[in-house]
Amino acid sequence: NAGVTQTPKFQVLKTGQSMTLQCAQDMNHEYMSWYRQDPGMGLRLIHYSVGAGITDQGEVPNGYNVSRSTTEDFPLRLLSAAPSQTSVYFCASRYNAGTVVSGANVLTFGAGSRLTVL
Amino acid sequence: ILNVEQSPQSLHVQEGDSTNFTCSFPSSNFYALHWYRWETAKSPEALFVMTLNGDEKKKGRISATLNTKEGYSYLYIKGSQPEDSATYLCALNTGNQFYFGTGTSLTVIP
């Protein structure tokens, strides 16, 4: 199993450019989420989804869009990148809360995507 | 926004020492408390998920306890080994949202 796959691993953008960070999982997890990790701060939730067609905002959603057209994929879009969006981004997935499967509740993380906006 | 605090921020111990860290969280909206281990250049990996007040979990030399009434969890490592060196994250899960602490960075000196 590949688990959670994120692409690209590294990206440099100029202010105002757009891009999409890809996240795919092959574990049939309903729940998928995006986090950003900044120095001195914990992982902060950007957006999450509890199933295809359903998305919701997390703690820091501004400047980011998401969609969930399939169970497997949860792309994160930056429509007009800003230097404040320079960060390391992690995608994570799990079964939905309340699922009675051993180990269902833990998050499985991707390898991360380092984004620099100049 | 819910504030999850971890202490200490960093810790250096000698191989063989036992150590413990604290995670403090607001008791309101509690669904579960997660612990993750994060090695440099890797992704966070789950250690424990705890849901009930008084829960104790153990995996090898690592164990954790939970007090939801007062809003804290302890992570213990018995007989630290160099391979235990990592950042240990706790996260408050309120159902569909997760609030992570900034982590405790552990360095075990051989």
Image (cartoon, rainbow, N blue to C red):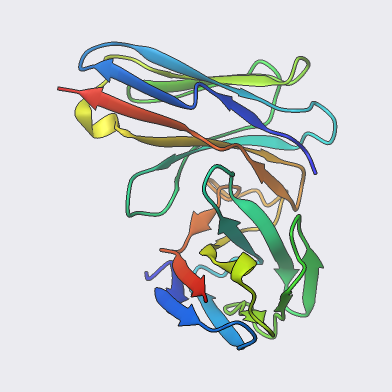
> Is A12 rendered above or below residue B80?
below
Q: Position of residue A65 (x, y in %)?
A: 73, 78
Drawn side of residue A14 relative to residue B82, left or right? right
> Is A33 rendered above or below residue B40?
below
What residue is at 68 percent from the left and 56 percent from the top?
Answer: A45
Q: Image quadrant of residue A41?
A: top right
Q: Nearer the viewer, residue B84 or A64?
A: A64
Q: Quadrant of the N terminus of chain A?
A: bottom left
Drawn side of residue A68 relative to residue B107, left or right? right
- How many numbered callouts? 0
Drawn side of residue B43 relative to residue B17, left or right? right
What residue is at 71 percent from the left and 27 percent from the top?
Answer: B25
> Is A53 rendered above or below residue B42?
below
Q: Position of residue B37 (x, y in %)?
A: 42, 39
Q: Position of residue B13 (x, y in %)?
A: 29, 17
Drawn side of residue A35 relative to residue A26, left or right? right
Q: Image quadrant of residue B70?
A: top right
> Is A49 rendered above or below residue A43?
below
What residue is at 71 percent from the left and 78 percent from the top?
Answer: A66
